[in-house]
Image (spheres, rainbow, N blue to C red):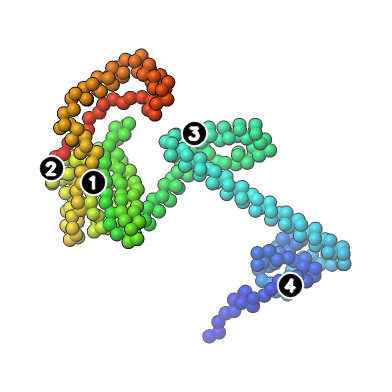
């Protein structure tokens, strides 16, 4: 059975004489008609001649000599101008898109509302009209609406998650750090951090997930979120080396805690148990309680309470710090650690 010959198997080369004879020029491995901008995909004289004779011969066959050459040169310049316009417009669209992503990144990093993108655009237009009025229209092409900023941030988040997923697949061993906290709306948020190393001893340390927990925050609820993150990043339980928690009963409970559920999951796969580590920050806080630094803490707490108890004292203290050019602008209330270490639940 004979093989079909491909169209470009002849390796044809564009003949410059065809420009004079048939008003064609070469553009990106294609023959383009200078008159109507139609494209002929194959450098074959028969195809070019047929197009010229059927479409343009009656109007352009009368042009000969220098008149024909001048006409060809004029048509070439027109085609080049059109192509440059398209290329420039494409570059402007790419620049506008990149600018939109940059603003979305700044808004996300600073934790500002997404709708502030519209205010940023108004500021850009005002500055552009004062400093470079001829380029003000360029700034108007940048889309910074609330929905656009939301979409940009979601796309960047998906991209970061994809990169983290690709990096996690290459980890030889990894550890997890779990911390459950309530946000300003009293919604439970579970932060899951991952730290691992691949075969080239390259360390990866990232926030793997921020999972919202609705209802109760028992060990079962937290464990389900951990499993969801493990599956999302395609992590292997066999490579889990350690788990760091804050020592809460829902975390370290010997029967229903997260660590107990993780050990049960690993036992089903006949793997070694990960090392359970207590968060060092909580350990330091617990140690400070047992040291009984009353001689120091009582004075500090009384000073803080004196400053924060009355608005006038607070304002005067802030002005005092401002006059000293201090690194800190205010003083915080003293807080207690919420969880204590317990081994059973």
**Pick the front one: 330 or 128:** 330
Q: How far is the residue under mark 1 from the one under mark 2?
A: 14 Å
- Is disc 1 placed on a helix, strand or loop? strand
Mark number, residue 244: 1
Q: How far is the residue under mark 3 from the one under mark 4?
A: 57 Å
If you read the primary sequence from the N terminus, does the residue marked by circle 1 or circle 4 appear first?
4
- Is disc 4 placed on a helix, strand or loop? loop
If you read the primary sequence from the N terminus, does the residue marked by circle 4 or circle 2 appear first?
4
Report which residue position mark 2 lands on.
343
Please report the residue visible at 87 percent of the width from the left and 63 percent of the height from the top.
67
Percent position (x, y) of residue 103?
Answer: 51, 40
If you read the primary sequence from the N terminus, does the residue marked by circle 1 or circle 3 appear first?
3
Neighbours of disc 4 within 10 Å: few (<14), some (14-19), many (20+): few
Please report the residue visible at 72 percent of the width from the left and 60 percent of the height from the top.
37
If you read the primary sequence from the N terminus, does the residue marked by circle 3 or circle 4 appear first?
4
Percent position (x, y) of residue 265?
Answer: 19, 54
| Residue 250 falls in image quadrant | top left
Report which residue position mark 3 lands on.
116
Percent position (x, y) of residue 286?
Answer: 18, 35
If you read the primary sequence from the N terminus, does the residue marked by circle 1 or circle 2 appear first?
1
Report which residue position mark 4 lands on.
15
Considering only vertical position in the picture, is 296 above or below 243? above
Whether residue 118 sits left or right of residue 264 in the image: it is: right
Q: How far is the residue under mark 1 from the one under mark 4?
A: 72 Å
């Amino acid at each position: 059975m004979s093989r079909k010959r491909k169209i470009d198997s002849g390796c044809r080369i564009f003949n410059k004489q065809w420009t004079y004879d048939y008003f064609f020029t070469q553009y990106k491995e294609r023959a383009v008609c200078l008159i109507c901008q139609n494209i002929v995909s194959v450098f074959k004289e028969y195809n070019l001649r047929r197009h010229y004779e059927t479409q343009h011969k009656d109007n352009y066959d009368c042009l000969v000599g220098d008149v024909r050459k001048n006409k060809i040169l004029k048509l070439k310049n027109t085609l080049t101008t059109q192509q440059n316009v398209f290329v420039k417009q494409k570059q402007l669209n790419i620049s506008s898109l990149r600018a939109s992503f940059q603003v979305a990144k700044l808004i996300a990093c600073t934790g500002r509302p997404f709708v502030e993108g519209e205010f940023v655009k108004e500021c850009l237009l005002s500055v552009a009209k004062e400093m470079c009025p001829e380029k003000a229209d360029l700034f108007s092409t940048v889309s910074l609406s609330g929905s656009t900023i939301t979409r940009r941030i979601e796309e960047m988040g998906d991209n970061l998650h994809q990169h983290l997923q690709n990096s996690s697949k290459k980890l030889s061993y990894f550890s997890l750090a779990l911390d459950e906290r309530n946000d300003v709306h009293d919604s439970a948020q579970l932060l899951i951090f991952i730290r691992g190393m691949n075969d080239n001893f390259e360390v990866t340390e990232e926030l793997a997930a921020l999972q919202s927990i609705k209802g109760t925050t028992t060990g079962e609820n937290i464990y389900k979120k951990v499993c969801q993150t493990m599956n999302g990043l395609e992590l292997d339980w066999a490579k889990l080396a350690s788990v760091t928690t804050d020592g809460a009963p829902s975390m370290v409970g010997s029967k229903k805690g997260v660590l107990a559920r993780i050990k049960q999951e690993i036992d089903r796969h006949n793997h070694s148990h990960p090392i359970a580590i207590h968060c060092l920050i909580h350990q330091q806080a617990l140690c400070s309680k047992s040291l009984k630094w009353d001689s120091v803490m009582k004075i500090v707490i009384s000073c803080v309470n004196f400053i924060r108890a009355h608005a006038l004292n607070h304002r005067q203290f802030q002005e005092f710090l401002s006059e000293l050019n201090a690194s800190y602008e205010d003083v915080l209330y003293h807080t207690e650690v919420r969880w204590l270490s317990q081994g059973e639940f």
